[in-house]
Image (cartoon, helix red, strand yellow):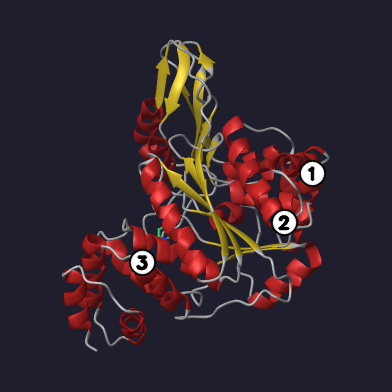
Amino acid sequence: MRIVDLIEKKKKGLKHTREEIEFIIDSLMNGTAADYQISAWLMAVYFNGMDIEETTHLTRAMINSGEVLDLSMISNNIIDKHSTGGVGDKITIILIPILQALGVPIVKLSGRGLGFTGGTIDKLESIPNFNCALPMEEILKQVKEIGAAIASQTAKLAPADGKLYALRDVTATVDSMPLIASSVVSKKIASGANNIILDVKYGSGAFMKTAEEAKQLSELMVQVGKNLGKKITAVVSAMNEPLGRAVGNSVEIIETIEFLKGNTSKDLEEITYKLASLSVLKMDMANSEDEAVQMIKKVVEDGSALEKFRVLIEKQGGNSNIIDDYTLLPNAAQIGTINATESGYVESIDALCIAKASKILGAGRDKKTDDIDYSVGVYLNKKTGDFVQIGDTLATLYVNADNNLSTAEILVKNAFEVKSEQPEYKSLIYAVIE
Ligand code: URA
């Protein structure tokens, strides 16, 4: 087989066999295919697509390019929740202690943020001394001891994805459904989960701009996961407004703790309870969604989920006193406010504008190697549906360097749309695909 013939085949829109796809991934991994050849093949896939069978073969080949974790010594039913990336999405960090309190074992391997989407690992690392670089033996030991562990994903899992993603990123081929589906599902399966729950976002602050595109991607990922023998569910949810009120790193940790203390906003609660109740149902621990939600509410209200978060922070070396004293988290030097210039009801808050502002302030990165500032970010004092009067604070900016402040201020101000009618709360959940 020759790579050039396989590029030609996909260029003509023909279907690859399993052997051909395995040959492409082997050639990528052993260096016999040049980056420009793989890039040309990616562009051919971008334009001509791949069907479910080809996407399944690609996913399998990517899984087999590296290590596959065996978590069967902990349980044969390990849940892994994964978000395709959003703005203010701190749900993984809230979900872990809730599931821990309910006795659901959870191993979470997460990534860092890139571009406009924040990363779970970055947020957790804003807790002084919190260690996410856990070797596998440590993860397994910790899950046995306290029921949960969260660590940064190693390059040994689905390494073909890392190589392909680097090429996709610089050849404008990221937004291809079969390439996204194989990238996400291969990493989840290589991480050892057999019960995967995907939170697939759409909207201004997400990869997929429309609900229908996100549904199509979800259907593809669910089918590929099933073809590879996994239980997999996708929740399709809107990401037009940041989830909750905080966008950044330490500010999102504060909002996580507040959620576990019982203070939350409706949108964050809706998605968190949906994903948590699906996890409980997948573990056969409840007979209905209502029953699952009651179980979840109980561990939040009685404080046991918050106590599990304390235990998790301490176990991973972090300073758990942050739970009672937020000043122990990285604090920004300056605080700015964006005030309303008209009265009315907040109609919408554009997620992408807020994400850009937070990134400009230093909370996000362009390149994997960039440093980030844990202390900066944006807090939404008002959410959609709230009434505001001229002069009310719409949002608070946590700032360290003045240089980008005015651009961030304009972005946050422009993110808010105020109208005279109060909008109704619209459920964020568009579909659940199983
Ligand atoms: N997230 C991933 O892990 N991979 C993609 O290709 C896109 C989003």
As helix, strand or loop, the secondary structure at mark 2 comes to helix
Residue linked to disc 1: 299
Residue linked to disc 3: 165
Q: Which quadrant of the render holds ligand 1?
A: bottom left
Who comes first in sequence, dot 1 or dot 2? 1
User: In the image, 27: left or right of 153?
Assistant: left
Who comes first in sequence, dot 2 or dot 3? 3
Amino acid type at circle 3 is Tyr
Q: Is mark 3 within 8 Å of ligand 1?
A: yes
**Residue beneath the point at 25% across and 62% down:** 46
Who comes first in sequence, dot 1 or dot 3? 3
Residue linked to disc 2: 313
Q: Which mark is residue 173?
A: none
Q: Is mark 2 within 8 Å of ligand 1?
A: no
User: In the image, 9: left or right of 410?
Assistant: left
Residue 6: x %, y % from top left: 22, 79
For the question of whether residue 94 can be seen, the reply is: no
Q: Find the distance from the CA under tag 2 to the CA under tag 3.
A: 31 Å
Which quadrant would residue 59 be assigned to in this image?
Answer: bottom left
**From the viewer's perspective, is residue 219 above or below residue 393?**
below
Q: Residues within 10 Å of mark 1 (few under 14, many from 20)?
A: many
